[in-house]
Amino acid sequence: MKQNIEASFLEIIDKLKGWLGAFIENLPNLVVAIIVMVISFYISRKVSKWITKLASKKIPQESITKLIGRISATVVVLIGLFLALGALDLSKTLNTLLAGAGISGLVIGLALQGTLSNLLSGVILSFRKKIQIGNWVKTTGYEGEVVDISLNSFILKEADNSMVIIPNKTIIENPLKNYSLTKTMRITVECGVGYESNLEEVEKITKKAIEGVYHQNDGTEVEFYYMSFADSSINFKCRFWVDSKDAKNRLEAKSVAIMAIKKAFNTNNINIPFPIRTLEFNNTLGVNSLTKQ
């Protein structure tokens, strides 16, 4: 028993001596590997700052530029790690790391498929010049001002000041209407007049009222169309152009137009009827005859 313990102890000492000898033998390579790693970390910081500054000139989203900078820094560090492992003559370890990285990347990619899709969509959105922060857009049933385009979500602030967070993937896959791309917007006002009205006069007065508050440029004119015979009125639609970039301007223009039309109709005694129902009794009941019976 004692001999076995001594043999085991001697075997451990031999292994420690072997490790110490290997360490001393590979000490120059270890120093080179450490120097390579330190230099790679230093270069990665410089590269990250340079790439971030360069990307900020093309991409307005700060989160995207920081992500690009971090990715570039990570690439530089990985290159330094592989060079350091090569200096230590750990080629087998290097191959194992590469194989493990491939398998791990596949597993992580499958597990985070939705997240990665939103991430890539966010990068794509950041390069789209026709979608910028501050634009007024309408998409997937929501309408509001774009306040942020992050790596995972597209954030809108609606007219009631509520925030809508939409996944970037949804924005990429669905139509988007951007009101801020043009300087003008067409406004539509609908109204109705009484059946006794002179329709030609109504059209002239309506167009004059609109042109009095919103002058039409570039040869355009106020459009006026009668639409239907309703129960209590003859309905019409009036369309005109205004300088507008968001929903507030559109609502203000419509409000001003409605007030101008109402004022003009009051001045010219044009009736805007409210819904009424007239009951006519053509067959009068003979009360006397019923009394006689």
Image: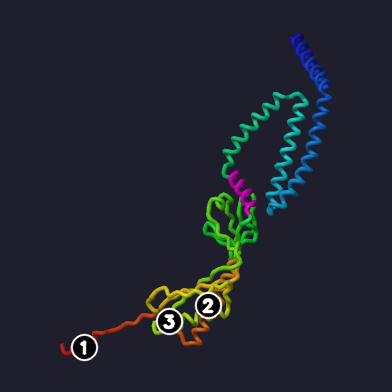
The residue pinned by badge 3 equals 199
Specify whether 66 is left or right of 169.
Answer: right
Q: Nearer the viewer, mark 3 or mark 1?
A: 3
The percent position of residue 114, horizontal first and vertical second, equals: 57, 44
> Looking at this view, is 180 or 112 the one in front?
180
Inspect the image, locate mark 3, and give the three-letter code of the amino acid beneath it: Leu
Residue 286, disc: 1
Residue 151, disc: none
Residue at left offset 70%, top offset 23% = 92
Question: Badge 1: how crowded within 10 Å, few (<14), some, or many (20+)?
Answer: few
Q: Which residues are magenta?
A: 115-128
Determine whether 267 is above or below 250 in the image. Answer: below
Residue at left offset 77%, top offset 13% = 11
Residue 258, disc: 2
Residue at left offset 70%, top offset 45% = 68
| Disc 3 and disc 2 in contact, CB within 8 angstroms | no
